[in-house]
Amino acid sequence: MRTKRFATLLVVLLAVAGMVFAGGGGQSTAAPAESKIVVNTMAYGDNSNAEGQSWVRIVESFERQNPNIDIQYELLYDEAYHQKVSARLAAGDVPHLAYMGADARWGAPWSESAQQVDHRPFLDGNYYDLGLIPPMGSNGEIWEIPLGTSNITTVLYMNGALVESLGFDTPETYADLVAMVPAARAAGLTVVSIDGADGWAWGSCLMSTFIARLSGDANWVSKAVAGQYKFTDQVFVDSLNLITRMVNDGVMDESAVLVDYGTNVANFSNGKALFMVQGQWAAGGIDPTVAENTLMLAWPQLPGEKPATAGTVAAAIQVGYGLTKAGAADPAVRDAALKFVQFYYSHEETAQRLIDGAIVAPILKNFQVPAELPTINKRKVTLAQTAGVTDVIDAFLGGAPNDALNAGMQQIAAGRATGTEVAAEVERLLGR
């Protein structure tokens, strides 16, 4: 009887086992699958542009190599991205990792929602060149890992062959520029050209360097906007008056206020100017033959400049990917996100961004510049990795005050306003 019961029970058990194997494969006998670490991410780009396409490709590659990590992302571009950032933060739907920056446009939403994280404790000094990542907070905090070095806005481009043809060398001081004026005029050339018809060029490409150099404070502009300085301070007035001095000395032409961006680059490419003032992005528009002999320089020593900011260039901090407080709260999520970011910033991907012009120069340690990079781009990398950086005016000063400053500098160059008058108008519009 006991034997029969045992046999019956055995048949039932075998039948049940057969049903399990038939219905679900071998999963019932396998060890439970390890749960994935999910990194909720706000990414920048879309399916129609290179940035978005690269993002998808890199994520897929990373997940294949790291099957325990799931990069769940929302991919948006331009205004759609900024609008969604604001909406998600307002709703308390905070991602772990996001494309962000340190200025008013890219950094303010994260700052205002108290979601910024100081990345200094997490940065691998053997992978990143920490000397190329600028401080972003008042106490030296680093809020995100920039894709590259800062975006230089105050480059002095020099046509080396043209300067040498007149018997001169690379200028070390403002006086060296003045010394070139007679020979340049005799040859029908401009010494320093600028697209003065574009108001922003005066602020971003000229005054951002002048005020930092004369004040000795790399962050004079951001401090002035915050109320620590005033735009009516004598040092800012003196910086504005350098425009008048340049026109009077013949270093810059009064007619510069009629020149637009395209004409400025074309004039330099056509050998009509010894030097050109513009941002690093203008390098790609210079005629390739001229570009081969073009140097990218910081402004030489200016009259009245302070040693603390000698040789600096104004540069806007590059955007990149950064953790939020929500992402840093869980060590597992934090480490997974940082691992992905390092993968995203690999030597190969960084090299491609450099070739494509998406970044100025890499922040990776011991980075080898691709041999196929054009000469002028290699010089751009050198400038970005060697010059100290300072505030860019319009990264901190916006709206009517910035518009008044840009228009006012055009008036100064044309001889229709003084530095004192323009400074007073900027300060008035700030309501102080």
Image (cartoon, rainbow, N blue to C red):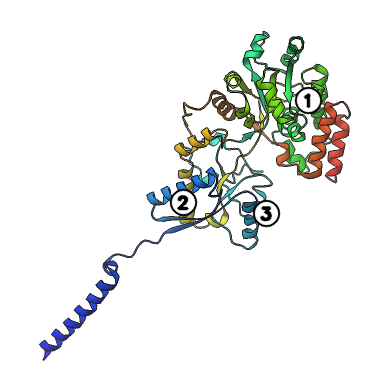
Query: Which numbered disc flags the more N-terminal residue, 2 or 1?
Result: 1
State which quarter of the image contains the C terminus.
top right
- SS at mark 3? helix
Q: CA distance from mark 2 to mark 1?
A: 52 Å
Q: Give the mark, 3 or 1, whose residue is nearer the N terminus.
A: 3
Helix, strand or loop at mark 1:
helix
Judge from the rendering whether residue 422 lies leftward or rightward of residue 314; answer left or right. right
Q: Amino acid at mark 1?
A: Ala
Q: Which image quarter: residue 27?
A: bottom left
Q: Which residue in the protein does label 1 denote?
A: 256
Amino acid marked by disc 2: Asp
* Residue 143 x %, y %: 59, 46
Q: Residues within 10 Å of mark 2 (few under 14, many from 20)?
A: some
Badge 3: residue crowd in 10 Å (few <14, some 14–19, many ≥20): few
Q: Residue at x 63, y 32 (%)?
A: 281
Mark 2 and mark 3 lie on one chain; the one further toward the N terminus is 3
Q: Which residue is mark 3?
A: 112
In front of the other: label 3 or label 1? Answer: 1
For the residues marked 2 and 3, what is the alpha-carbon distance in whole angstroms? 25 Å
Q: Nearer the viewer, residue 99 or 128?
A: 99
Label 1, residues with CA under 10 Å away: few <14, some 14-19, many ≥20:
many
**Snapshot quadrant of residue 200:** top right
- State the mark number for residue 123: none
Q: Nearer the viewer, residue 118 or 326?
A: 326
The reply, left or right, for residue 131 in relation to residue 299 is left
Q: Which residue is mark 2?
A: 335
Q: Residue at x 20, y 83 (%)?
A: 12
